[in-house]
Amino acid sequence: MKAPFLIIPVLFLFAIISCNSNPNETNGSVASEESFAPPASVESGKMAEMEMAQDGEAVGDESSVENTPNPSTSGPKKIIKDGHMTVKSADIEESKKAMDEVLKSLKAYYETEELQNNDHQTSYNLRIRIPSENFEQLISSIESGGDEIMHKSVQTRDVTEQYTDIETRLANKRGYLKRYKELLGKANTIKDILAIEEQIRPLEEEIESQEGRLRYLSDQVAFSTLNMTLYTDKEYIYKPQPKDNFWERVKKSVSSGWAAVVDFVLWTIAIWPFIILIVVGYYIVRRVRRRRTGK
């Protein structure tokens, strides 16, 4: 008889435990469903990224821009060397041949070469481009060549900071361009595509401009420039101007006199109104004087 009474409390406890466990299982299932809930639409995400991109210069956050590696921080310095020289030579042809040989051995070349020859002087105006590591050797070769150095000027410019700044800007803009293109690949509407392309176009133009500037600086750093004037003075020789014979000079004189007569006649014809006014005025004044004399 005690067994049935013992079973009833056990069943009652089991029911209470079952009731307490069901809500927990329900909450767990709800939580799991919420954790695997689908994200917002791709369209809204793209538009949010586009708005962020349009608000600033970049699509990415500031931390990614600031952490862009600087490619030239630890590299060699970027130095541009330019020079100007004026050299007086006793034998300009031999000096020019020697200069040609020196440039060939130093892997240099003439960017421009101009020859001027007159009665007083023969000169070469040369613009030389030479690898930067051979620039000092070229100057030394010219100074030790035996010609007289009349003028020498060498300028050195450190463009490392400018070069590094351009490289950093390029790296950032290329990163921005890459992200814009990724957004362009995700765009589904024409409005989104046009909006992204409007951002891409000026960015590509800026990148091309900066790349051109970087190439120019790289060329100036890799090759130094020497503007050189090589000249020699000539001994002045008086050369009288040749003259025509007597009859030729007579012909020219007659021709010049006839031309003067023609010019006078044409000038007189040109001022005929003034001549008429002078004649009329003369007769009026003369008539008035006669009347006064008669009275």
Image (cartoon, rainbow, N blue to C red):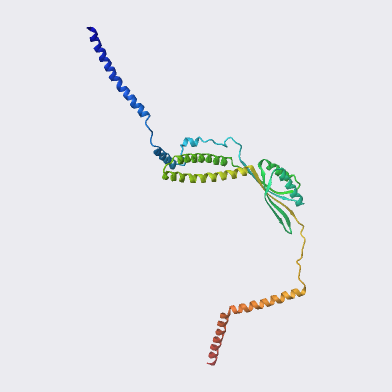
Image quadrant in which the N terminus is located: top left
Question: In the displayed image of the protein, which residue is found farthest to the left?
Answer: 1
Closer to the camera, 278 or 105? 105
> Where does residue 57 sit, x and y in percent of width and height?
47, 42
Vertical placement of residue 73 versus 102, above or below: above
Q: Looking at the image, which residue is at 65% across and 78% down?
A: 262
Closer to the camera, 144 or 199? 199
> Where does residue 250 sit, x and y in percent of width and height?
74, 76
Q: Looking at the image, which residue is at 30% across and 21% down?
A: 22
Q: Looking at the image, which residue is at 69% across and 77% down?
A: 257
Q: Quadrant of residue 252?
A: bottom right
> Where does residue 179 sit, x and y in percent of width and height?
48, 39
Q: Quadrant of residue 8?
A: top left
Vertical placement of residue 114 versus 273, above or below: above
> Where does residue 220 sit, x and y in percent of width and height?
62, 44
Closer to the camera, 90 or 254? 254
Name the side, left or right, on which 261 lies relative to 95: left
Name the side, left or right, on which 93 lies relative to 74: right
Name the side, left or right, on which 197 lies relative to 140: left
